[in-house]
Each structure stands twice: as C-alpha cells, then as structure tokens.
Amino acid sequence: MGKVAVIQYPGSNCDLDALEILRDVVKVRTDLVWHKDLARDDYDAYVLPGGFSYGDYLRAGAIAATSPSLRIVKDAAEGGKPVLGICNGFQILVEAGLLPGAVLRNTTLRFVCTWTMLRVETTRTPFTSEAEKGELLSIPIAHNEGRYYLDKERIPELEGNEQIVFRYVNEKKETTEDANPNGSIDSIAGICNRDGNVMGLMPHPERASLPVLSPNNRTGGRVIFNSMTRTLHGPRA
Amino acid sequence: MTPGSYVVEVIVENKPLARDPEGETIHLNLILKGGYNQVTGVRAGKLLRMNVEAESPEEARVIVRKLSDDLRIYNPAAHTIQVRVIG
C-alpha cells in the first residue's frame, strides 16, 4: 500500500479537494504536508496542488520552486516515484526544472475559468494508465498563466518521447484555436518528463472527480487518481 | 571604478518567438488606435531595479547577471533578459 503526500505551499488551493479525492474516493493513504515539514522522501508519490503560491510573484511557481521540498520531490522523481503537479503545481514543476518549458500568461490576458475537453495522448504515465488513448476527459481550468510554451523546434522531440499527455480539443476530438483556452503551443494541456513518472497539467482533475461537485455529474478527472492508485497498489490481479 | 552603491536594472521579456499578448494589445488597442502609426511593434516585459553594493559598476552588473541565472529571475525556456547599470 502506497502513501501519498499532498504538499501545501503558502497560497495553495484545492489542496483539500485533492486530499479528499485521494483519501475518500480512490482510497489511498494520504497526508497533507506543509512544504517546510517535508524533510525526507517518506512517501510513495507526491501531489503539488493548484493555487497561487507566494502570490505568483516574479512568475507563477517561481518562488515555490526554490522551496527545499522540491529537492525531496526531485530525488523522489529521479527514483521513479509518481509526481503530479496540478495548475500551480504544474507551474512549480516547470520552474523547478522537473518538466521542460514555461507556462506564460494566457493570450486572452484574462483569468479563464471554464470546462475544457482534453484528449488523452498517452497512457504510459502512472496518471493515465487506466485511461484509453484518444479518450476525452471533461475537466475544468482556472488560471491566468496557463499558456504552455516550448520553443517550436523542440515540440517534435516532446511528441517523439511521448511527453505530451493531454491536449485541449473540441467535442470531435480536434485541436482548434477555439478549443485552446489559453494559447498553449500545440494545444498542450499537460506533459510528463522523459520517464513519464512526473506529470503536470493546467486543468484541475480534483474538481471533476466527485459527481456532487460537478455540473452534469462529470467525473473526467477521476481516471487520473484511479491510475495513480492502481500504480501504487501494484498491477491488477 | 569607485566602490559604492549602484542601481542595476534587469529587464525580462518573452523570447522573440514567444507571443507577447500584452505588448500586442497595447500596440493595437492603444497606440495604433490613438493614431501613432509610426510605432510598428511593442513588447511588454518586467523591470526589476536593484541597489547593489559593489567595487565597480561592472562588478555590480556581474553580480546581478549571476543571481538572475542562479535564482532563475527569468525562465530561459521562454524569456530573455538584459542587465544594465543605470547609476
């Protein structure tokens, strides 16, 4: 049985939602850990939640990325443990160098809070292993800095390594300008590291995991936590 | 070359190929709309002005350049910086 840490930074939000989904919905032992209290790699997986750590000063995630907790997370990631960054958690992982690229201000220059459709691009990560390639997930976003950026010439490399995990699409599963809510390059909503065990995404799966919290009972985010739990509990019997 | 306190500025901008929607909006919706057609482009960025104790202006610039790289004052994946001593 694995144990998960949800790491709390000053300004985190949806940390309690992630905790609830992990503990009470997908039933995995989970602690909420203040970032300064994370002294050792005592957990089997880490979740960096959303929010506005350190007021998003300098850049979203830039200051939290210097927290000593990131050293622990980095070691854990190098050891192959699953690490999930949601929204601000994604920005922190990018700023800490665990994931490539940058997350810039939305092209609309507005905070965007809406439901998006995501296409699962790979099932090789511990967070998508229970999904199907090409599957559509309906998961909301809420951010001002969500435009994923990487130099264009590096996109084929990311694609070739199967590091693009989710893309924003329309209901026909097509990437279009209208379906891309923040101007992310190549409609990228989530990526992973080369090994696949570190994943970050701008959408909030913990806000789409309990029917009672979602309009139309949408639970598109739950497969991410189910996959993570399955990974921690070992392969299916 | 006198030791003292220097003012050093760091200007952080998106790389030329990374779109800068703030600069584009200021250009299209303010400057061109206001009739200043001579302006052909605008890039918005961030300015950090630091007071630095150093032996010389060059040393002050080197310190700020180093801290900008070490502490990731900018994200090299998406940004460029200019470091300049202004006084």
Image: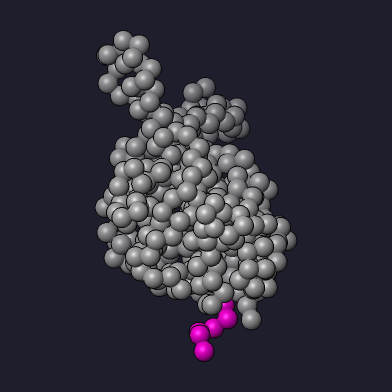
Q: Is residue B30 above or below residue A35?
A: above
**Magenta span:** A232-237
Horizontally, residue B32 falls left or right of residue A219, namely: left
For the view shown, which residue lies furthest in the top direction?
A: B35
- Which secondary structure class fits the magenta region best? loop
Q: Is residue B66 visible?
A: no
Which residue corresponds to the image point at 48% horizontal and 40% vertical from the top-left?
A112
* Residue at x 46%, y 73% (from the top left corner): A130
On the image, the x and y values in percent for residue A113 come to: 51, 42
**Viewer-proximal residue among B32 and B63:** B32
Q: Residue at x 61, y 71 (%)?
A: A26
Residue A225 within the magenta-colored segment of the rendering: no
User: Could you say where residue B68 lies in the image, as x and y percent from the top left?
Assistant: 50, 42
Which quadrant holds the N terminus of chain A? bottom right
The part of the image, by quadrant, that contains residue B31 is top left
Name the residue: 58% across, 52% down.
Answer: A50
Q: Percent from the top left, x then y, of residue A197?
A: 48, 70
Question: Relative to residue A15, is residue A2 depicted above or below?
Answer: below
| Camera-nearest residue between A22 and B8 | A22
Query: x%, y% of residue B1?
Result: 51, 27
- Answer whether residue B22 is visible to the viewer in this image: yes
